[in-house]
Amino acid sequence: MAGDGVRTTCPYCGVGCGVIATPASDGGWRVTGDPEHPANFGRLCSKGTALAETIDLDGRLLSPRIGGRDADWEEALDLVAARFGAAIAQHGPDSVAFYVSGQLLTEDYYVANKLMKGFIGSANIDTNSRLCMASSVAGHRRAFGADTVPGSYADLELADLVILVGSNLAWCHPVLYQRLAAAKAARPTMRIVVIDPRRTMTADLADLFLPILPDGDVVLFLGLLAHLDAAGRVDRDWCAAHVGGMQDALAAAHAVIAHELPVLTGLSADLIERFYALVAATDKTVTVYSQGVNQSASGTDKVNAIINCHLLTGRIGRPGMGPFSVTGQPNAMGGRETGGLANMLAAHMNLEDEGHRALVRKFWRAPALPTQPGLKAVDLFRAVGEGRIKALWIMATNPVDSLPDADAVRDAIRACPFVVVSDILPDTDTTKLAHVLLPALGWGEKDGTVTNSERRISRQRAFLPAPGQARPDWWALAEVAKRLGHGDAFAYDGPADILAEFAALSGRGNDGARDFDISALAGIDGADFDALQPFQWPWPEGTERRETRFFADGRFYTPDRKARAVAVTLPDLGAFATDRLILNTGRVRDHWHTMTRTGRSATLSAHLAEPFAEIHPEDALARGIAPADLVELSSAQGRIVVRALLSSRQRCGSVFVPMHWSEAYASAGRVDVLVPPLTDPVSGQPASKRSAVELRRHPAALYGFALLRRKPTTFSADYWALARTHGGWRVELAWDRMPDSPDLLAQALLGEGESLSYRDAASGQMRFARFDGAALAGLLYLSPQPVELSRVWAAGLLRAEMDMPQARLAVLAGRADAGRPDDGPVLCACNAVGANVIHAAIDAGAMDVDAIGAATRAGTTCGSCRAEIRGLLHGRKLQAAE
């Protein structure tokens, strides 16, 4: 507890920020950063700041459902156990599968893995972390002999050079970005390099930006390895004593020099030389990488190409040095630790190691463990589609939207004989396909632990009661295990009991032989569990809790205790046809995964409220695409329709589309329907950053914008995108053909009641508004072109008094009056500060980001928007100089 608040952990990215949930005076909750948590020291991003907006029970799944009808737990669990048991009896253990998630707590993960591998006897359990971090796992295991992240967040602050590769830290791990920005401000001699096909907001912090070709980073780091060797920047004694395979790795790297690096990387010779010289001259170097490295058909080789450079120079395991993989989900690391991947055992033991299998089997008293890896995510759903999986249990994830070839995944799940989904919502694109729905606990209700990207285990504490019949995921798994005849092995009293067992397993037969060891917690009870403070593993039994790094002593987890330098070869970069673009997918600043949480927040929907394609202006011009047009992207797998966002930050020849929009929020925004099921051959991770797509303007006959107090249930439009706003909902609309009667269309959307309308025959614009007493009930603007209107100003009308005629006429005029100025598009989500407010502050003399913050509060809460504020400021300075 913290005063009257509860200390817990943020449920978003892998930074693992500590938060304090405190009762608010209005009966709700307030969420603030925990100043004592060593991951964030009180900092939060926009998503963490808005957490209290996402915990209401609107639309929650509150009881089990069977075939769409409400049921009780006994009936649902009996059915799940019977159908899984029948499939196992008739078709064998490999006919069933679990697909789990980095949203689960470690205790949930442990029980799921134990049930599937230890007692069902199959390795067919995989996790959505396969989609974001599997290449890091594979690269770590090849190089270190274990999935070990060597360093800590503090290394980013201690380094003299931080290289960010395929990592939009400012938007995807904002608190790490804030820590890095603060360190650079305090020590301006620190240098930052950003390597990315897009000039993301993170690049605005960089001293050097390398706009690399997609998948060109393997080549870049092979060239760097050769350069470091040729320049004599090699720790030869350390390599000789602690690294194997370096000569082969160097030979492969030097072979790259025969190729044209600028052609293969898309970078000028000058940029490459400057980068190589900077790395060669700087001992204290940290290389941070994330999905831009991992989500590739050559992702594992990318990881090893980066690690090779650190091994060659001995820059690993010491303060301010090392390769650093940052995870995408709050408990991706916990899943890796408990064996949530199809090719792993619990406590970082290897499924294919006979000794490890024997140890785990004996500890669990399991009937038998599988000897071969199970199906990885993409292959698992392919097997579902082929009918090889007869019973499937999906937990806390939405694969219909997040896996590649997403339409094929939906078809596969729909055809599966028996599908169970554990979730908090009944109407996601995946839960709609379930035969049995099980109501899970959500964030704020869960109790357990999570592990962040720096190996720090933190408590997630419940501060809300379990709603309805919602139950922990580990409990549902244990109840099914009991019905399958394994009750003694799953007789847990609570999460502390599970963690104690997991901790005991981590220390069994270890004594430093394995990296993961938290056996100090093997005897933990409920009181100690409640009071558990954040700590970094390892924490072996009989030792004190401490901050840790790995590998400074040169001891790794391979048989000879030496690291392995991997001989990485050139990837097949291929070539796209001239009429196709390279599709890159990823996250935006204020949304998360498929928006089942962030879509509930009006604050988080204010910044980017609609699915979009970020397109270079030259690519748009060549295709006749104007700003705010609708565009269609297509591939062999499918098609989507999204809004065009023209930006010179995007590399010419590439297009970026966010991953977040599902059919709950847009008519055709599921970007993963475009992505082919191509995976890295080592890790099985999908290649989500480099797909070939065609792009064309989508010709709409009529565009619309609606603002509604009540959430609409159906749309007549061919295109729609829905977003929550304060007081209601905003909707973007478009029709491929002109509707027969716009008046009837408006009536259907706005309903009956007191109304006003306006038509301009010359421009074709039509506007409708309906009022409910002194309040605006809804408005609809229609136009032959994309509707020009300040959405932020319009959204404010839902909270305005509309009893005066001039106020109502202003709604139809579509512009702010003197008493209600237009703040412009929201730039700072935390404090709802628009671009026009920031421009006004600049005009009034605020000439740096801090001064703008003092005048407007923009960028003063989470700081995630500071790069965008800096961009506005830079643009105004350029205008002033012209």
Image (spheres, grey):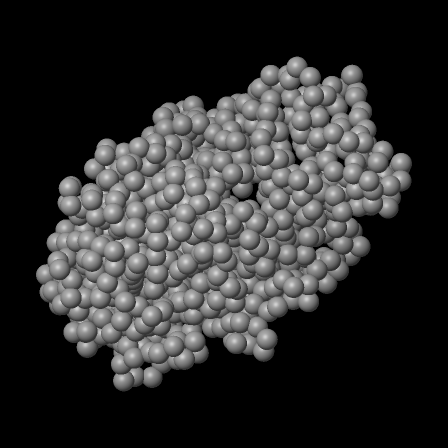
Taking the view exactly as shown, the residue that stands out farthest to the right is 805
Q: Determine if residue 845 is in view.
A: yes
Residue 741 location (% of width, % of height): 69, 17
In the picture as drawn, the residue positioned furthest to the top comes out as: 740
Looking at the picture, how far across and down is residue 425, in whole percent? 47, 47
Residue plotted at (49% across, 73% down): 37
In depth, the one of 102 and 841 nearer the eye is 102
Question: Can you give x and y, in whole percent of width and height, for residue 772 in the image?
Answer: 78, 38
Q: Determine the image quadrant of residue 777.
A: top right
Q: Is residue 646 left or right of residue 778?
A: left
Depth order, front residue of 574/252: 574
Quarter holding the C terminus? top right
Name the residue at 62% across, 29% down: 733
Is residue 812 shown left or right of residue 88? Answer: right
Q: Position of residue 596 (x, y in %)?
A: 50, 47
With respect to residue 359, does 568 lie above or below?
above
Q: Can you say whether 8 is above or below 767 in the image?
A: below
Residue at (39% x, 80% y) in the render = 528
The answer to which quarter of the image holds residue 42 is bottom right
Residue at (65%, 64%) from the top-left corner?
27
Depth check, front residue: 246 or 639: 639
